[in-house]
């Protein structure tokens, strides 16, 4: 994959995971740094629940976990408690 194609793919993934979040919910997203793919894990009702969920999933070297609010804004990166 060319650098330009990779950049376009990453932009499309970022837009996909940050759009259409239900009002009042927080989206938890698992990102794979190896293949630049993102998986929407689910939605939490509160920010604290989303943070706890993201932190429980964090820990892999090639993965990161993000939380977005219902407006698609980044609000937290999961932190491993190990």
Image (cartoon, helix red, strand yellow):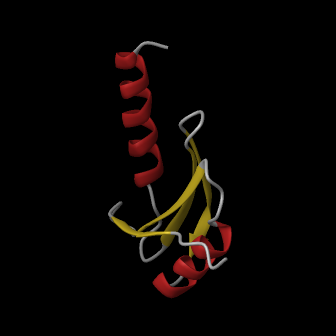
Tell me which corner region of the image, top left, top right, bottom left or bottom right, holds residue 43.
bottom right
Residue at 46% x, 39% y is 13
Q: Position of residue 70 (x, y in %)?
A: 39, 68
Q: Give the side of residue 13 with respect to residue 8, left or right.
A: right
Whether residue 19 appears in this view of the structure is no
Q: Position of residue 50 (x, y in %)?
A: 54, 77
Residue at 42% x, 12% y is 2
Reply above or below: 68 against 24.
Answer: above
Q: Position of residue 30 (x, y in %)?
A: 59, 55
Direction top: furthest residue: 2
Residue at 43% x, 23% y is 6
Residue at 60% x, 52% y is 63
Q: How many marks?
A: 0
Reply above or below: 13 against 22.
Answer: above
Tell me which corner region of the image, top left, top right, bottom left or bottom right, holds residue 15.
top left
Q: Position of residue 8 (x, y in %)?
A: 37, 26
Quadrant housing the C terminus? bottom right
Q: Give the side of residue 60 with respect to residue 79, left or right.
A: right
Whether residue 77 appears in this view of the structure is yes
Relative to the observer, which residue lies in front, 38 or 57? 57
């Amino acid at each position: 994959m060319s650098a330009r194609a990779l950049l376009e793919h990453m932009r499309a993934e970022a837009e996909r995971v940050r759009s259409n979040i239900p009002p009042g919910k927080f989206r938890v997203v698992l990102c794979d740094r190896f293949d630049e793919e993102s998986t929407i894990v689910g939605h939490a009702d509160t920010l604290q629940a989303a943070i706890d969920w993201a932190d429980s999933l964090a820990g892999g070297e090639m993965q990161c976990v993000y939380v977005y609010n219902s407006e698609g804004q980044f609000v937290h990166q999961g932190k491993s408690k190990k």
